[in-house]
Image (spheres, helix red, strand yellow):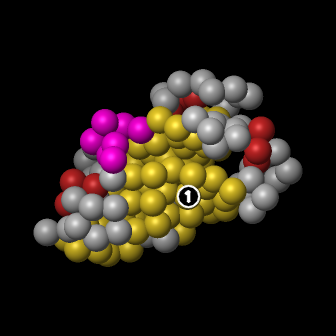
């Protein structure tokens, strides 16, 4: 079972930026789609972004398009989420996750089977 460890969260003012990192254990990191999800207090976990095995294909939730960028470094077994122009509504715990199967899959959380512990992002107005 892969282990995922997120870092980089914190408190930032609206309009600011943060870069989240997710370090993975194991030897098969490059064989799986990776994703970022978030969960705000009292809300369900929602999809944020995902990236294909090679990093050539990405997908974003509409509200973060143009502000967030997902990337990966397979040599370092790490996936990143660069978040710019942050808004108070981006406040949430952010989780990285590994795709359940080999292939692109879907953005549904059920298509991801390994999850990190999460990192808190708080955006003040």
Q: Quadrant of the C terminus?
A: bottom left
Between 80 and 124, the one lying in front of the other is 80
Q: Residue at coordinates 39% horizontally, 60% vertically from top-left? A: 83
Which residue is label 1 attached to? 80
* x then y, percent, for residue 1: 78, 46
Q: Residue at coordinates 20% horizontally, 68% vertically from top-left? A: 14
The answer to which quarter of the image holds residue 61 is: top left
Q: Residue at coordinates 69% horizontally, 56% vertically from top-left? A: 73
- Exactly how many numbered labels are in the figure? 1
Farthest right residue?
27
Q: Is residue 62 magenta?
A: yes
Q: Is residue 95 magenta?
A: no
Q: Is residue 40 left or right of residue 81?
A: left
* x then y, percent, for residue 60: 41, 38
Q: Is residue 68 left or right of residue 78?
A: left
Q: Which residues are magenta?
A: 60-66
Under circle 1, the secondary element is strand
């Amino acid at each position: 079972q892969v282990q995922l460890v997120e870092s980089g969260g914190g408190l930032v003012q609206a309009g600011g930026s943060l870069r989240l990192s997710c370090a993975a254990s194991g030897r098969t990191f490059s064989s799986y789609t990776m994703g970022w999800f978030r969960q705000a207090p009292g809300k369900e976990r929602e999809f944020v972004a995902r990236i294909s095995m090679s990093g050539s294909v990405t997908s974003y939730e509409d509200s973060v398009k143009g502000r967030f960028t997902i990337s990966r470094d397979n040599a370092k077994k790490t996936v990143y989420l660069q978040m710019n122009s942050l808004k108070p509504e981006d406040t949430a715990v952010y989780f990285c996750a590994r795709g359940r199967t080999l292939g692109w899959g879907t953005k549904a959380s059920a298509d991801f089977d390994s999850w990190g512990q999460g990192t808190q992002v708080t955006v003040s107005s």
